[in-house]
Image: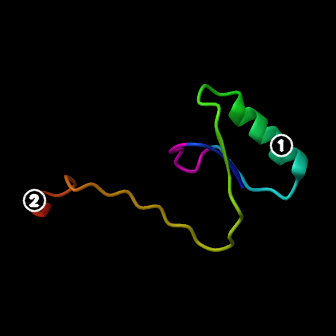
Amino acid sequence: MIKDDGLAGGKGVVVTNDENQALAHGADCFSKPSGTVVVEEYLDGPEVSLFASPMAAPSCR
């Protein structure tokens, strides 16, 4: 799995077994202003993203 570094909301991620596609996406990531890329091992199964803030609910204070 090749993706842009940072929060992208699932955008900018390529999951592929094709080496040329992975290299092309990595080169595209490096050409952006941040110039960083994340390479992760592919794990099969559901994915969950969780964002939390202590200021989210008044009852948390």
In this rendering, is residue 17 above or below 3?
Answer: below
Tag 1 residue: 23
Residue 54, x across and y down, in percent: 22, 56
Along the line of sight, which residue is nearer the eye, 60 or 37? 37
Rendered position, 33 above or below 23 = above
Q: Picture quarter containing residue 26?
A: top right
- Amino acid at circle 2: Arg
Q: Is residue 56 above or below residue 32?
A: below
State which tag comes first along the sequence, 2 or 1.
1
Q: Quadrant of residue 24?
A: top right
Q: Which mark is residue 12?
A: none
- Determine crowd level at label 1: few under 14, some 14-19, many 20+ residues with C-alpha closer than 10 A: few
Q: Position of residue 12 (x, y in %)?
A: 64, 43
Q: Is residue 41 magenta?
A: no
| Secondary structure type for disc 2 | loop
- Tag 1: amino acid: Leu
* Residue that appears at 81% across and 47% down: 22
Residue 17, image quadrant: bottom right
Q: CA distance from mark 2 to mark 1?
A: 47 Å
Q: Main secondary structure of the magenta part?
A: loop
Q: Which residue is mark 2?
A: 61
Q: How many numbered marks are there? A: 2
Q: Residue at x 74, y 56 (%)?
A: 15
Could you tell me which residue is drawn at 88 percent across and 51 percent down?
A: 19
Return the residue found at the far bottom. Answer: 45
Tell me which segment is drawn in magenta: 6-11
**Quadrant where the N terminus is found in the figure:** bottom right
